[in-house]
Amino acid sequence: MIQEKPLALVVTQNLNTKLFFRKNLEDKFHVIEKKEAPLAIESAETTNLDLVIIDEKIENAIDLCFQLKKRKRLFTTPIILITKSIKKAYREKATKAGVFDFLFLPLDADQLNQLLEKCEEDKKRRKKVSSISFKLKKNNP
């Protein structure tokens, strides 16, 4: 059985950013690119995404993070925000909106790979917790 690649949604209008993700994600993910928030939301509603990467430069980027995170099928999907801001207040606002972590500009392949590993570790942890929770519910009806 052939295992399909996981799906990554990249939301950006910047051509260099798109090219960076095409180059650095193509071996691990099938990349879906969108330029605007409404198109990203539409993709999220019709596709089982494994990763979302949003460029802070798109209009209402933080709001888009919140809009995606509140959807049931994306509740546990990591959202990474591309940013140049390291201000604490901005990071807190983004985290409250559902951002899993940040990819800082200038884009760096090593930093991206570290974030992907962190996402995978979080996915394994969530799966383990879910399994334990299911067993507890099963044993305590």
Image (tube, rainbow, N blue to C red):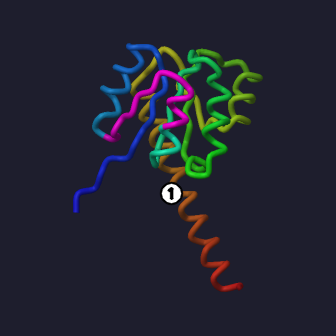
Residue sitting at the far right: 89
Q: Is residue 133 left or right of residue 15?
A: right
- Horizontal and vertical percent for residue 123? 52, 53
Q: In the picture provided, is 78 more to the left or to the right than 18?
A: right
Q: Is residue 2 left or right of residue 52?
A: left
Residue 9 location, quadrant:
top left
Magenta stretch contains residue 45: no
Q: Residue at x 44, y 14 (%)?
A: 14
In terms of depth relative to the viewer, which is nearer, 88 or 6?
6
Residue 72: horizontal and vertical position, in percent?
61, 51
Q: Which residues are magenta?
A: 28-42
Q: Position of residue 97 (x, y in %)?
A: 70, 35
Residue sitting at x 28%, y 38%: 27
Residue under the point 48% across and 38% down: 43
From the viewer's perspective, is 69 left or right of 41? right
Front in this rendered view, residue 107 or 30 = 30
Residue 46 location in percent, x, y?
A: 47, 45
**How many tags in the picture?**
1
Q: Which residue corresponds to mark 1?
A: 124
Q: Residue at x 55, y 35 (%)?
A: 41
Residue type highlighted by circle 1: Lys
